[in-house]
Amino acid sequence: MTELALCGSRVGVVAQRSILIVDDEPAVRSLLREIAEGLSIACQVYEAADGQSALEIARSRHPDLVLLDIVLPGASTSGVLVCQELCRDSRTKVVIVSGSANKTILRTCLSMGAADWVTKPFVPRDLRSKLMTWLAD
């Protein structure tokens, strides 16, 4: 599933930033989209429920920021493999958003080039602040 939304409350402003949300849980994608849409900057939000869709969207849309769950369905497009592929594009900042307690996997993603990670559950207000920081860089 792919969805597009315009972030920010400024109507008529051309989108300047884009975010790709990758998570197999619809409720998490919805919450992350809601947080992104509440930002004070204009941006486009794309969603993907699996690694293959995420890679397709990333190749065609070149998002500025990807919020990536590392536990995704499908062995050929696991979150770690998606992270590796996404980090090859220096224009895209990848942030891991995961409930996984596996620090080895998180370190692996960081060594591949992921910019940061957020542990689920997260505080929406804190994540909103971090989004603004990541998009400003």
Image (cartoon, rainbow, N blue to C red):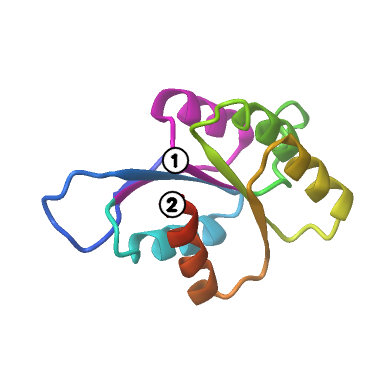
Residue 59 drawn above or below residue 13: above
Residue 73 drawn above or below residue 84: below
For the point 66% across and 43% down, which residue is it? 114
| Residue 130 horizontal/vertical position (percent) | 52, 64
Q: Secondary structure at mark 2?
A: helix
Residue extent of the magenta highlight: 43-68
For the point 73% across and 35% down, which residue is it? 112
Residue 64, label in figure: 1
> In the shown orientation, is residue 80 left or right of residue 126?
right
Three-letter residue code for mark 1: Asp
| Residue 65 horizontal/vertical position (percent) | 49, 44
For the point 73% across and 31% down, which residue is it? 81
Q: How crowded is the residue under tag 2: few (<14 C-alpha within 10 Å), some, or many (20+)?
A: some
Mark 1 vs 2, N-terminal side? 1
The mark tally for this picture is 2
Q: Nearer the viewer, residue 70 or 39?
A: 39
Q: Which residue is mark 2?
A: 135
> In the shown orientation, is residue 116 left or right of residue 92?
right
| Residue 118 horizontal/vertical position (percent) | 65, 61
Residue 84, label in figure: none
State yes or no: residue 22 in magenta. Answer: no
State yes or no: residue 62 in magenta. Answer: yes
Cα–Cα gap, marks 1 and 2:
7 Å
Residue 108 drawn above or below residue 97: above
| Residue 107 horizontal/vertical position (percent) | 82, 47
> In the shown orientation, is residue 134 left or right of residue 112?
left
Q: How crowded is the residue under tag 1: few (<14 C-alpha within 10 Å), some, or many (20+)?
A: many
